[in-house]
């Protein structure tokens, strides 16, 4: 199963988990929740450990600093029953109740994304959960702002296979453009905390890549399609400037001979069927076309509002080198180096984190602001440090 996080919880009892938050999108369900950090069985122990090991001088007598694990999981939306089964088997829906009344019908879980509306009745019927709907765009923004302010080494640039983490100056964060590449793409101008405007979007996004890719290559999973694209050569299918200009650059307008003039353009000029092309070349061309297009539209919106930084999130990115490289090159090319594409380590979980952060607003005070991330992905991935069923250790400030 894509998002089976069973191993994540093998050390956690029902009582250990809390703050379940969901982002139910067109392609994927993202889940975030807290558990006690393994090896720390009581708050006193945790306090003692932290007081010995870390500086908690900012705490007052009615502040405690706890150690918690934040869990990240995803499921395919088309397999929502697996997500429901998982929540049920781990009793995650009761995590925030003091008395853990298993019969209560007041199990309220923060949820965002279109599925919070579409599947509200299903969650009520199967789990007795009432989904407390939180606006999708405000969750994306809250999640991004939180990560950029509270988590070390979250944002990075990616150019020519080089990943460079960017130190974010909190005073110089806004405004920025947030581009969330999910099934579809939303572009949001972020001006501050809870201050934003969705300025654009495009339906040519992750769902397009996966949907078209599935049809054209017969790949059985998104990861398989990505892996395939690694081995491909897009020039076999894309029509390049050089193909049109007899091998030379069109230098007068700044187009080199290797620039793609027309994505998939060669497929029209040759007497070939789909089967005559290698699936890896098709996958490569498709990935390049979609990433380029997103990079270009993002740049145009950044230009529209004079924004220099564009943060890309959403599960389409997947920490995938070629995707990030293509987007970065597009932004760099069109902006003549003026704008920067930045990526986020927790790219796919912005919405779920935003919903999770929302518990605070409703009087929940025990998720504090001292949310220091210590990267400790418990499962390595070929694409990124933390994405599939990863955990991060955090220190949480609790006000008694
Ligand atoms: N394991 C996977 N299965 C399916 N799609 C995946 C997977 N991993 C990455 N993706 C890509 O991520 C996209 C979904 O990203 P994300 O979860 O951010 O969006 P979403 O919330 O489902 O969509 P939307 O916000 O438009 O409703 C897919 O369309 C696909 O391109
Ligand atoms: C509809 C949403 C917001 C659902 O997440 C997303 O898929 C999206 O932004 N699609 C692009 C729609 C458009 O602006 O053309």
Image: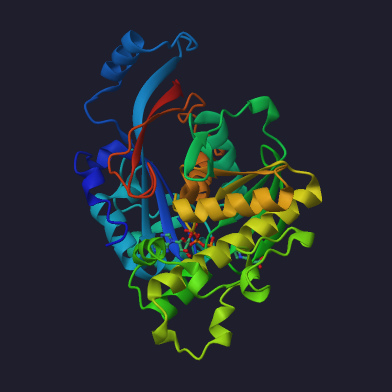
Using the image, determine if residue 372 lies above or below residue 316. above
Residue 27 in the image, given as x and y percentages of width and height = 46, 66
> How many numbered marks have been drawn onto this rendered protein structure?
0
The reply to whether residue 197 is in sight is: no
Front one among 313 and 81: 313
Nearest to the observer: residue 38 or residue 247: 247
Residue at (26%, 17%) from the top-left corner? 45
**Residue appearing at x 56%, y 60% in the figure:** 291
Task: Please provide percent x and percent y for residue 368.
Answer: 49, 27
> Is 5 above or below relative to 77?
above
Q: Residue at x 49, y 23 (%)?
A: 370
> Relative to 226, is 146 on the left or the right?
right
On the rendered image, what quadrant is the C terminus found in?
Answer: top left
**x and y percentages locating residue 167 in the rendered image:** 56, 28
Left or right of residue 61: residue 266: right
Dividing the image into 4 quarters, which one contains the N terminus? bottom left
Q: Residue furthest bottom?
A: 271
Residue 85 locus on image (x, y percent)? 27, 61
| Quarter of the image where one finds residue 239 | bottom right
């Amino acid at each position: 199963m894509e998002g089976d996080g069973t191993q994540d919880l093998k050390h956690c009892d029902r009582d250990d988990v809390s703050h379940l938050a969901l982002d139910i999108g067109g392609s994927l369900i993202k889940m975030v929740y807290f558990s006690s950090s393994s090896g720390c069985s009581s708050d006193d122990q945790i306090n003692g450990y932290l007081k010995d090991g870390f500086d908690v001088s900012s705490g007052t007598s009615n502040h405690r600093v706890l150690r918690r694990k934040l869990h990240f999981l995803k499921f395919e939306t088309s397999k929502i029953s697996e997500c429901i089964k998982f929540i049920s088997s781990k009793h995650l829906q009761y995590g925030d109740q003091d008395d853990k009344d298993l019969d209560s019908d007041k199990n309220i879980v923060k949820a965002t994304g279109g599925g919070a509306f579409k599947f509200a009745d299903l969650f009520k019927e199967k789990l007795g959960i009432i989904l407390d709907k939180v606006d999708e765009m405000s969750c994306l923004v809250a999640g991004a702002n939180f990560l950029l302010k509270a988590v070390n080494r979250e944002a990075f640039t990616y150019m020519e296979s080089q990943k460079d983490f960017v130190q974010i100056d909190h005073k110089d964060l806004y405004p920025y453009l947030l581009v969330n590449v999910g099934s579809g793409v939303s572009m949001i101008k972020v001006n501050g905390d809870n201050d934003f405007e969705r300025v654009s979007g495009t339906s040519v996004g992750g769902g397009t890549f996966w949907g078209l890719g599935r049809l054209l290559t017969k790949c059985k999973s998104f990861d398989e399609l990505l892996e395939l694209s690694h081995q491909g050569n897009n020039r076999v299918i894309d029509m390049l400037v050089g193909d049109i200009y007899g091998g030379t650059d069109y230098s007068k307008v700044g187009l080199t001979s290797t620039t793609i003039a027309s994505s998939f353009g060669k497929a029209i000029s040759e007497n070939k069927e789909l089967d005559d092309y290698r699936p890896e070349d098709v996958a490569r061309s498709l990935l390049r076309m979609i990433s380029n297009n997103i990079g270009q539209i993002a740049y145009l919106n950044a230009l529209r509002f004079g924004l220099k930084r564009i943060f890309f999130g959403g599960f389409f990115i997947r920490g995938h080198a070629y995707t990030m490289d293509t987007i970065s090159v597009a932004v760099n090319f069109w902006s003549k180096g003026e704008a920067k594409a930045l990526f986020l380590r927790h790219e796919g979980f912005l919405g779920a984190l935003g919903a999770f952060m929302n518990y605070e607003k409703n009087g929940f005070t025990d998720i504090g602001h001292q949310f220091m991330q210590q990267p400790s992905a418990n499962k390595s991935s070929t694409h990124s440090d933390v994405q599939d069923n990863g955990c991060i250790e955090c220190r949480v400030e609790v006000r008694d």
